[in-house]
Image: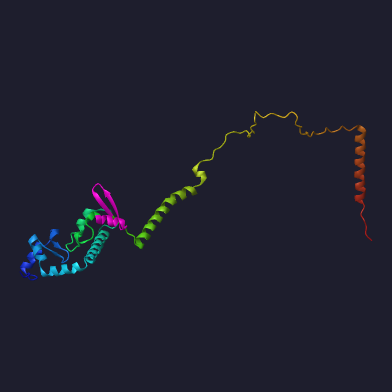
Amino acid sequence: MPKAEVGSTKHIANKMKAKGLQRLRWYCQICGKQCRDENGFKQHTQSEGHVRAMLQVGEDPRKYINDFSNQFRKDFLQLLRTAHGEKKVHMNNFYQEYIKDKDHVHMNATKWPSLTEFAKYLGREGICRVEEEERGLYIQWIDDSAEAIRRREDIKRKDQLAKAEPAKEEEEEPQDQKQPAKMSLSLTANKKISNPLAKKNPLAKKAPVARAEPEKKMSNAERIMKEELERKRVADERSHGGKRQRFH
């Protein structure tokens, strides 16, 4: 039966019927064709184009499986990175977002038998963080680009500076503002506390104490003689001071 011409009523009707997701079992990954029912899929597998494509795949099936696997991983991570970034998401819910594109590479064409095995692969390769919780598996993309590493280092450095600033302000605060100085109300001088258990050595020599000698009293004769000598000294000074020395 010939195909409907593009733009015809039959072609538009077929497009409307094919809109949305169809059964996975009726999709041919080799030819990229989605059939609407089992009979249509059977007719497609018997077509000349499908048989010729399968013969080419049979020559090197490992190559085709690796190509489909790489394309599936690339598209999956591209959508995860652009839609959620480094946010943790539920694995199965995100896979539903991925298969909304009808032209996506199907899981049964890859080397991973299930979505769980693919999640384990992402965790082993360090591409994503994989955690198993009550609701199932959660994945989180790891951005290991140079820009992301530099951005994380800047954020870490800013956090360290923010934590260090309050501690620095506390150290620079004056000590007199931290605690007022204590004043003593005692007016007496501090006395040295002696040890009551210490015993004095009775054989120790005592330091000599200097005593001031009392002044001796002068007799009347000595006083008169002293006064006479004083008057004589004064008279001699006057007689020598009154004469001027002449120079020839």
**Residue at the right extreme?**
248
The answer to whether 101 appears left or right of 139 in the picture is left
Nearer to the camera, 64 or 246: 64
Of residue 119 and residue 189, the one placed in the foreground of this image is 119
Magenta-drawn stretch contains 121: yes
* Residue 43 included in the magenta stretch of the image: no
Rendering coords of residue 213 (x, y %): 82, 33
Indicate the colouring scheme: rainbow
Q: Nearer the viewer, residue 222 or 43?
A: 43
Q: Is residue 42 left or right of residue 213?
A: left
Stretch in magenta: 117-139
Q: Is residue 43 visible?
A: yes
At 36% from the left and 59% from the top, the residue drawn is 149
Which residue is painted at 25% across and 55% down in the image?
Answer: 117
Is 240 placed above or below 52 here?
above
65 or 125, which lies in front? 65
Q: Residue at x 28, y 51 (%)?
A: 131
Indicate the quadrant where residue 198 lies: top right
Residue 168 drawn at (x, y percent): 47, 50
Quarter of the picture containing the N terminus is: bottom left
| Left or right of 113 on screen, residue 146 | right
Q: Position of residue 197 (x, y in %)?
A: 65, 28
Q: Quadrant of the C terminus?
A: bottom right
